[in-house]
Amino acid sequence: MSNENRGAAPHRAEAEREEFAEPVEGFRAGFLSFVGRPNAGKSTLTNALVGDKVAITSNKPQTTRHAIRGIVHGSDFQLVLVDTPGLHRPRTLLGKRLNELVAQTLADVDAIAFCIPADEPIGPGDRFIAQHIRDMGRKPLIAIVTKADRVSRQALGEQLLAVQKLGESVTDGEGWTEIIPVSATAGFQVDEVARVLAQHMPVSPPLYPLGSVTDDEDAKIVSELVREAALEGVRDELPHSLAATVEEILPREGRPADRPLLDVRVTVYVERPSQKAIIIGKGGSRLKHIGATARPEIERRLGSQVHLDLHVKVLKDWQRDPKQLNRLGF
């Protein structure tokens, strides 16, 4: 990743503190990407390391669709985490473009962390990803066994051995640079993961100001928070068809200076009229629930009270339509 991009402005809500940390001797800073099959715990681990919500989470596959950056600050390091979409064998043009995004991201980072859940056996998807990242050049490849709290100590040990064998099989016997078990939800070894990842960053001054947690734009984060709320409780076929875009974020005129209000208008896109009916719900009940779920996090992110205006539109087969994918930012 080019040095000129490393100094990009932090998230607007965090930009009040522009001072940089005074780096100690040997300070390390760099970019690291989490990879793994869908629902491997990448976004949850990203949020736990950053200490803030910068990536949306869901038990639905392909939740992450953008390369989200989260920034981790330590006394002698700074990690810029790039949480990518899950690598997979694509079935649509959207899937192909998401894989291309992952490949572009991995080519630019300083190290790669491969997330493998402790509570699921290693399968073809894991081997597909392991073989893919093996060809990304001579950079540290760290295996992280996520969701360690979901299994017994014996089962965790067996999974760590299986992960070790996977690494040896795809790296001509060299194996992973490191293997670390973690539970982001239970707080198990989260600090240790940060420490180990930082050891594999280049010696560098801080890349982002103190206090910044992400450099993603407000509009992208707001759209993702709405999509996260919309993903709750939907049937398996619907998550892939959901997209959201922010049409506008505008201050309400005539509000007192001490009680500002932002008007935020978001459009949720689906592929079929039947899906639109599901999202809206009977009498608009589900759409109201989506708004009520997303609004508190949006207000926290934007630092203001928000009036959230949601609309649902049908874009037929948008996942396979190049024009619509471009329109939606993919």
Image (tube, helix red, strand yellow):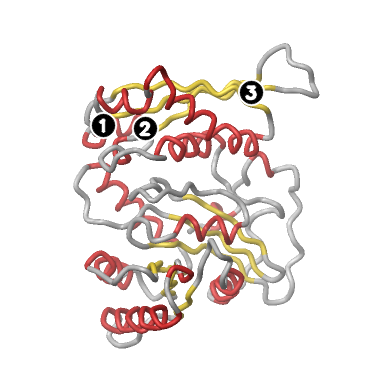
Q: How far apart are marks 3 and 1 (CA)?
A: 30 Å
Q: Which of 73 and 307 is in front in this view?
A: 307
Q: How far apart are marks 3 and 2 (CA)?
A: 23 Å
Residue type at mark 3: give it. Leu
Q: What element carries label 3?
A: strand
Circle 3 sits on which residue?
262
If you read the primary sequence from the N terminus, does the residue marked by circle 1 or circle 2 appear first?
1
Circle 2 sits on which residue?
328
Q: Is mark 2 on a helix, strand or loop?
A: loop
Residue 291 sits above or below residue 157 on the image: above
Q: Is there a contact, CB below 8 Å, between mark 1 and mark 2?
A: yes
If you read the primary sequence from the N terminus, does the residue marked by circle 3 or circle 2 appear first?
3
Q: Residue furthest top?
A: 254
If you read the primary sequence from the N terminus, does the residue marked by circle 3 or circle 1 appear first?
3
Circle 3 packing at 10 Å, graded few (<14), some (14-19), many (20+), is many
Q: How far apart are marks 1 and 2 (CA)?
A: 9 Å
Circle 1 sits on which residue?
318
Mark 3 against mark 2, which lies toward the viewer? Answer: 3
